[in-house]
Amino acid sequence: MIHESAQIHPSAVVEEGAIIGENVKIGPFCYVDSKVEIGDDTELTSHVVVKGPTQIGKGNRIFQFASIGEECQDLKYKGEDTRLIIGDNNMIRESVTMHRGTIQDAGLTQVGSNNLFMINAHVAHDCVVGDHCIFANNATLAGHVTVENNAIVGGMCAVHQFCRIGAHAMLGGGSIVVQDVPPFVMAQGNHCAPFGVNIEGLKRRGFEKPQIHAIRRAYKAMYRSGLTLAEAKTEMEKDVEAFPVVQHLLDFLSDSTRGIIR
C-alpha cells in the first residue's frame, strides 16, 4: 500500500506489498522490497536498498548506497524470517549497512530514534541501539552488541560481538572494544581502556553538578581506588539513594557477561 502523497521516482522499484506512508520520498534507483514498511515523512535520497522484513519509522533520512535490512553475514543464517526495526528521525548517511537478526538471538535488530550514522557505519545482526547516539565514519558493531542511549562511537571503532556500550559513554576514534564500556565513561585504544568520565557530554545533556560528582566517585571506585569490582560496587551503593543515576551504572555492571574494560 502506497499513500497517495508519497513521491516515488520513476526509476525506483517498490515491490507490491510494501507499505509506504504519507509524504515519503523515494529517490532515483532505490529498491524497496515487499516486506518493508516505511513511515511518514521518511526520505530515501537515491540508490538505497531496503529489504525486509524491515520497519522504518517516521522522519528518517537515508542517503545513497545505504543497505538496510539485508540478510546478515552470520554463517548460521539460513534464510529465516528475521527482522530489522528502525525508529524515528534518524540520519543514515552514505553506505551505511544495517542487517536483520538471527533466530539464535531474538530474531531482531533494533535501532532507536534520533541517531546519526555517518558514512559507512555498520550495525550487524541482533544489535540493539538506543536513542540519540552518534556513530562516526566507519564505526562497526559486530553481532549482538547493545549500545545504550546517548553513546558516541568514534570513527574507525570496532566493537566485538556481545559487548555493551553504556549510556553517555564516548569511544575515541580507532578503538577496539572487546569488553563492556560502562555508562558515562570515556575510553580509547586497542584494546579499549578507560580514561575518565564524559563530563562535557553530561553537562550538555543537563546533568547537574551533584550528579556528575556522584558519577565521578563511582568511576574512582571502579578504576582508581585499587578496589575489586565487588568492593567498588559496595562503595558505589552509598550514593544510590541520593543519586539514582548511580543505580543504572550498578545495574549495568551486574548484567555484564564479558566484564568491563580495564
Image (cartoon, rainbow, N blue to C red):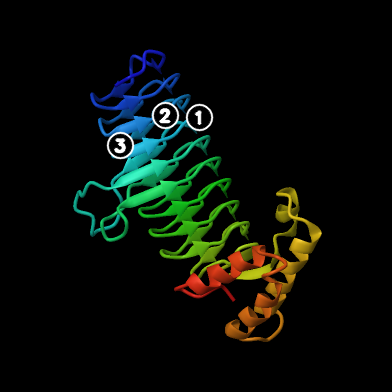
> Marks 2 and 1: CB-CB under 8 Å?
yes
Q: Can you say which quadrant of the picture contains the N terminus?
A: top left
Q: Residue at x 54, y 54 (%)?
A: 156
Please report whichever mark, 3 or 1, sits nearer to the chain's N-terminal start.
3
Quadrant of the rendering where the C terminus is positioned: bottom right
Residue at image point 48% right, 24% down: 41
10 Å crowding of disc 3: few (<14), some (14-19), many (20+)? many
Residue 190, picture quadrant = bottom right
Q: Determine the residue positioned at 59% across, 58% down.
A: 167
> Does the rendering let one see residue 153?
no
Q: Which residue is mark 2?
A: 39
Residue 209 position within the rendered picture, expressed as x and y whole percent measured from the top left: 80, 59
Describe the element under mark 3 as helix, strand or loop: loop
Residue underneath mark 1: 59
Task: Judge by depth and name the residue closer to the eye, 199 or 249.
Answer: 249
Q: Which mark is residue 51?
A: 3
Q: CA distance from mark 3 to mark 2?
A: 15 Å
- Residue 100 appears left or right of 135: left
